[in-house]
Structures are given as structure tokens and as C-alpha cells.
Image (cartoon, rainbow, N blue to C red):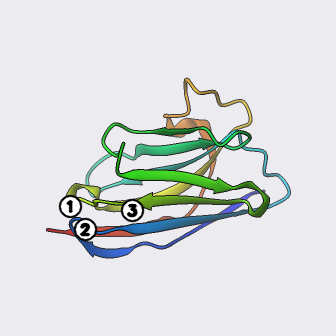
Amino acid sequence: QVQLVESGGGSVQAGGSLRLSCAASGRAFNANYMSWFRQAPGKEREFVAAVYWYTGRTYAADSVKGRFTISRESAEKMVYLQMNSLKPEDTAVYYCAASRPTTSSVNLYYSDQYNYWGRGTQVTVSS
């Protein structure tokens, strides 16, 4: 089993910054990708950013490119999401997710490629 625990959410004004953290544990950890997804009220869960665990290569949704940065500390099994220039439309519950070992760069954007999820952390951005 793999456990993922997010932290760092909160409330900020538009233009502010937050840093989310995700701690992974468990002897079964063998993800290719660690990602952040988010879900706003009444909307479907959407991909935010991913990092390839072995090289650190990153991927980001167009809506957050240039504002959000994902990174990882492989030795500590930590994943981070630095969020700058936050907008009200970034308001959502943010989830950390660990992919299957077979996930590729083609399908890392889809939630069904992830078999472990954290409980989520709320991010609220006010205008």
C-alpha cells in the first residue's frame, strides 16, 4: 500500500502564493509519475501538474503554466506544488496522486492512471 498526505492549503487573496506538499510512504511505492489534480465545486477533477519520478521532468496544464511549479525530493518521497499569481478560478480541493508503474507521458493527464490518492487539501483564492 501507498499513503499520500497533502498539506499546505489555505486561503489567500488573488495574486498570492501557496506551496502544497505531498508526503508519500509505503513499501509499494513504484509510481512513474506523481501528480497534482484539483476539483472545484460542481466540476470534474482536472489535471494540474505532474513530475516523472526518475528524472524530474515536469508537465503542467495550460491553465497553470508559468504560475505553478511541481517538484520532487525523491529521497524523501516528497512532491511539492508551488503556486504563484493565484486566481479565484484556482479555488479547489487539490489532490496528490501516484500513478501506476505503466503510466506513460501520453496518458499521465488522466485520473484513471492513478491508483493512489491523498485526501486533498483546500485552496481558496479570494478576489
Q: Residue at x 37, y 76 (%)?
A: 10
Task: In the displayed orientation, state which residue is furthest to the bottom.
Answer: 11
Residue 107 placement (x, y as % from top left): 55, 27
The local secondary structure at tag 2 comes to: strand
Measure how far apart labels 1 and 2 are at the Cα level: 5 Å
Tell me if 46 is positioned left or right of 32 in this view: left
Three-letter code, disc 1: Pro
Residue behind mark 2: 125
Measure how far apart labels 3 and 1 are at the Cα level: 13 Å
Q: Counting residues from the N terminus, which is met first, the one under dot 1 or under dot 2?
A: 1
Residue 11 placement (x, y as % from top left): 31, 76
- Answer whether labels 1 and 2 touch (C-beta < 8 Å): yes
Q: Residue at x 39, y 39 (%)?
A: 61
Q: Counting residues from the N terminus, which is met first, the one under dot 3 or under dot 2?
A: 3
Q: Residue at x 86, y 57 (%)?
A: 27
Q: Residue at x 75, y 64 (%)?
A: 76
Task: In the displayed orientation, state which residue is furthest to the top.
Answer: 106
Residue behind mark 3: 93
The local secondary structure at tag 1 comes to: helix
As drawn, the label of residue 88 is 1
Residue 94 placement (x, y as % from top left): 43, 59
Tell me if 9 is positioned left or right of 43 in this view: right
Residue 1 placement (x, y as % from top left): 78, 56
Front position among marks 3 and 1: 1
Three-letter code, disc 3: Val
- Up-down relation of residue 2 to residue 109 (above or below): below
